[in-house]
């Protein structure tokens, strides 16, 4: 993949890129409408043209807008297939920075080049994503992973998100008000992701708290070779999820890795009340003996007691049968509002009961087979049906607490990975979840 020798860093340069991309998208729509008049319009072709133009622009800019594209690609209900395919590339293969820009970053924070700090340092990135890229280094016989943040990413989070809003509303076909409901949460988390010193502290903290869990491993972090925009840790050998699946592992190995992942998230959510909230395949490494390595703690969601006590009361089996208790909880969680009409209440109670029943299924049994593609098809079909319903389109406003954004993303990501892994998992849950809910 061709390397980038520069990244637009000023607001003017980045705004110009967004404007030119918007113009290209407008041209794509114009071309599509002309073809529609003459009877040759293809909606999928329009999606493919737009997805390519948007991804190419965001890949050049890097940063928060590309990260949002990556996040959206994880939800199969959110985007047409053409966008999913393109935006998924942001997890692994954004165009990397050229080596002179890497050296410039090291000089800024350490006053030295990488070659002066390490015994060896790869001039080409071994992995490049939305916020930064990774190089391999060695020092005193130890293999290291060195993550370098792209220039200007941290300073452009807020302005980029403002400029990406029009593109997002058009792609997602949602209102500005609905998008705005969650933007503050997204912006806060993206700002945290650009703080590598915070990631180092959280990585060490969660690693220590989860070190007793079986079949998990974590890299050691090196503060002396890390800073605000550079993070150095152990290099973990192994396979990313697509390589692991392609190696045709035994069902026993799939289940072992899947169980380690479930246990990791269970402990974080229910014991630590903070969770690694970026469960996409690029953040995990699987060793030949079936041990799961976790290599990125840039996105961590802290869970408040108030949110926890409300959200997780929705998951126990049978909760949807207790209508009045459920309604009270829906009002507390902002799924229902005082100004809702009777028809609004009937509609939202119906769809949220369906969603809760579907998404809570893994918690309703002692073991769950995530290889059940029919289960995931039902989830995607449900999301597609709800998003197209006249009542939902009429409402056009976001429902639920903002805290749910990253917790839902965590569970969707976890479920999807376990499905790709075709794993069967003992779905452990806290003891109180077996009890009757009290609102």
Image (cartoon, grey):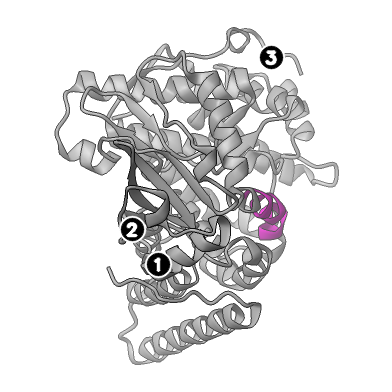
Name which quarter of the figure residue 48 lies in. bottom left
Above or below for 51 versus 248: below
Q: Is residue 407 visible?
A: no
Under tag 2, what secondary structure? loop
Q: Secondary structure at mark 1?
A: loop
Image quadrant assignment for residue 216: top left
Q: Which residue is mark 2?
A: 125
- The magenta segment is 178-189
Contact, CB < 8 Å: mark 2 with mark 1? yes
Counting residues from the start of the chain, the first of labels 3 and 2 encountered is 2
Q: Which residue is mark 1?
A: 97
Q: Using the rendered image of the protein, determine whether residue 358 is visible from the camera's viewpoint.
A: yes
Residue name at image x 48 percent, y 35 percent: 221
Q: Which residue is mark 3?
A: 437
In the picture, which quadrant includes the C terminus? top right
Q: Is residue 387 above or below residue 177?
A: above
| Of the two numbered discs 3 and 2 in the rendering, the one whose residue sits closer to the viewer | 2
Residue 358: image x %, image y %? 49, 31
Q: Are marks 3 and 2 in contact (CB under 8 Å)?
A: no
């Amino acid at each position: 993949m061709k390397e980038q020798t520069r990244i637009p860093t000023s607001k003017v340069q980045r705004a110009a890129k967004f404007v030119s991309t918007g113009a290209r998208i407008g041209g794509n729509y114009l071309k599509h409408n002309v073809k529609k008049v003459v009877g040759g319009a293809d909606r999928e072709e329009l999606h493919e043209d737009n997805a390519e133009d948007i991804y190419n622009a965001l890949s050049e800019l890097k940063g928060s807008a590309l990260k949002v594209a990556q996040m959206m690609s994880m939800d199969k209900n959110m985007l047409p297939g053409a966008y999913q395919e393109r935006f998924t590339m942001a997890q692994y293969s954004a165009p990397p920075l050229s080596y002179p820009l890497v050296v410039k970053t090291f000089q800024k924070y350490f006053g030295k080049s990488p070659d002066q700090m390490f015994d060896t340092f790869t001039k080409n990135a071994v992995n490049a994503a939305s916020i930064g890229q990774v190089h391999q280094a060695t020092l005193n016989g130890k293999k290291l992973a060195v993550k370098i943040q792209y220039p200007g990413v941290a300073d452009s989070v807020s302005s980029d998100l403002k400029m990406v809003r029009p593109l997002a509303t058009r792609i997602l076909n949602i209102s500005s008000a609905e998008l705005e409901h969650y933007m503050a949460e997204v912006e806060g988390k993206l700002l945290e992701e650009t703080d590598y010193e915070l990631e180092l502290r959280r990585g060490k903290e969660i690693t220590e708290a989860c070190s007793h869990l079986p079949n998990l491993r974590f890299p050691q972090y090196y503060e002396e070779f890390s800073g605000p925009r550079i993070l150095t840790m152990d290099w973990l050998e192994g396979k990313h999820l697509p390589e692991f699946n392609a190696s045709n592992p035994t069902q026993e190995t799939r289940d072992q890795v899947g169980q380690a992942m479930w246990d990791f998230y269970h402990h974080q959510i229910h014991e630590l009340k903070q969770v690694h909230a970026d469960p996409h395949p690029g953040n995990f490494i699987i060793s030949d003996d079936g041990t799961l390595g976790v290599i990125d703690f840039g996105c961590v969601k802290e869970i408040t007691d108030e949110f926890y006590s409300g959200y997780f009361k929705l998951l126990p089996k049978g909760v949807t049968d207790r209508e009045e208790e459920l309604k009270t909880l829906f009002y507390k969680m902002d799924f229902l509002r005082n100004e809702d009409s009777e028809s609004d209440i009937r509609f939202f109670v119906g769809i949220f009961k369906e969603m809760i029943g579907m998404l809570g299924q893994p918690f309703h049994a002692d073991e769950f087979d995530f290889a059940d593609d029919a289960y995931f098809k039902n989830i995607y079909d449900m999301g597609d049906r709800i998003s197209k319903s006249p009542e939902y389109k009429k409402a056009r406003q976001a429902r639920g607490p903002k805290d749910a954004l990253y917790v839902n993303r965590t569970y969707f990501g976890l479920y999807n990975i376990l499905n790709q892994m075709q794993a069967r998992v003992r779905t452990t849950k806290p003891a109180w979840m077996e009890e009757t809910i009290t609102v």
